[in-house]
Amino acid sequence: MWNRDEYTSGSVGAGLVIEPPAYITIEAYSKDISIVNGKIINLPHQKLAKKLLNVEKNIRVTCTTAATLGKGYGLSAALSIAYSIGYYYAKYREVKLDTIFRMAHLIEVKLLTGLGDVIAEVEGGELEIREKPGAPGIGKLIKVKVGKRPVIVIELERKMDTTTMLRSMFAKIKTGAKLLEKLTEEKDLKTFLDVAYNFSKHVGFLDCSIEDKLRKIKNMIMGYFCKKQVLVIVPEEEFLEDVYEYVCKVFSFPCKVFYTRYEGTIVKIEKC
């Protein structure tokens, strides 16, 4: 949803906040560098953060995470938050989180890599419902407790980045927002999974081949849905091991187990 500026623009919708989270450290360094799970990456988000703050100092950002960049976990938003914190502190020697979080949202919107990820990650919620678009402190997010539930994520081999998805599917995504009305009336996990499933079908993320593979275990799962390059399955807790073993066999893609998390972003400053 595009409004008068990037701070009030963003997406309405809902999602599950999962753990383990991304653990990110930021430190002064001789050059700008980002390392994710031991590999050097080059994200435009880092350059944009530095440009927006007009800072000359360099930082090293090191991230350890079970998530994969570019698959739909919202990892670029986590890194945008880290870049914003790092360069802001490098320039001002202090941290103003409200300003920093809004800047991270600005970066994500400008680069079209996440229209609602920053506010979801900052504020948290096992189930988060974004009723009003915008950056943290501007948009409106409802945190819903659903308990610490296991979530199986299967990383599909689809060549679809967020920018391409938003540009090519914007009309369908926008009309799909009407499904959110049901969730705002019945704020629970089952309703979310029903809405997310229908949205996946409406947009075209969920195809028949995936549905066919899951048909044998439908009595063991609460629900499932697809977003961009991941298939998300919420199993009944007593069947977690059985469902995980099954999907590992029928899908030739990485399968990972996460758990819903209520806490949002935690920032700690350690001065040397």
Image (cartoon, rainbow, N blue to C red):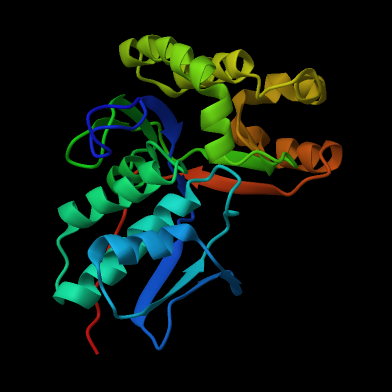
Residue 33 drawn at (x, y percent): 47, 76
Left or right of 7 in this view: 156: right
Is residue 263 visible from the viewing direction of this image? Answer: no
* 268 relative to 178, above or below: below
Counting from the top left corner in percent of width and height, residue 77 is at: 41, 50
For residue 246, what is the image quadrant?
top right
Would you identify the image quadrant in which residue 14 lies?
top left
User: Which x, y percent locates residue 57?
Assistant: 30, 80
Left or right: residue 31 compared with residue 141: right
- Residue 61, compared with residue 156, is above or below; it is below
Q: Give 52 or 266, whichever is nearer the viewer.
A: 52
* Residue 95 in the image: above or below residue 115: below
Q: Quadrant of the N terminus?
A: top left
Left or right of 261 in this view: 92: left
Q: Where, quadrant-wise, is the C terminus in this rendering?
A: bottom left
**Would residue 189 be seen by someone viewing this image from the given angle?**
yes
Q: Residue at x 69, y 44 (%)?
A: 155
189 w.r.t. 67: above or below? above
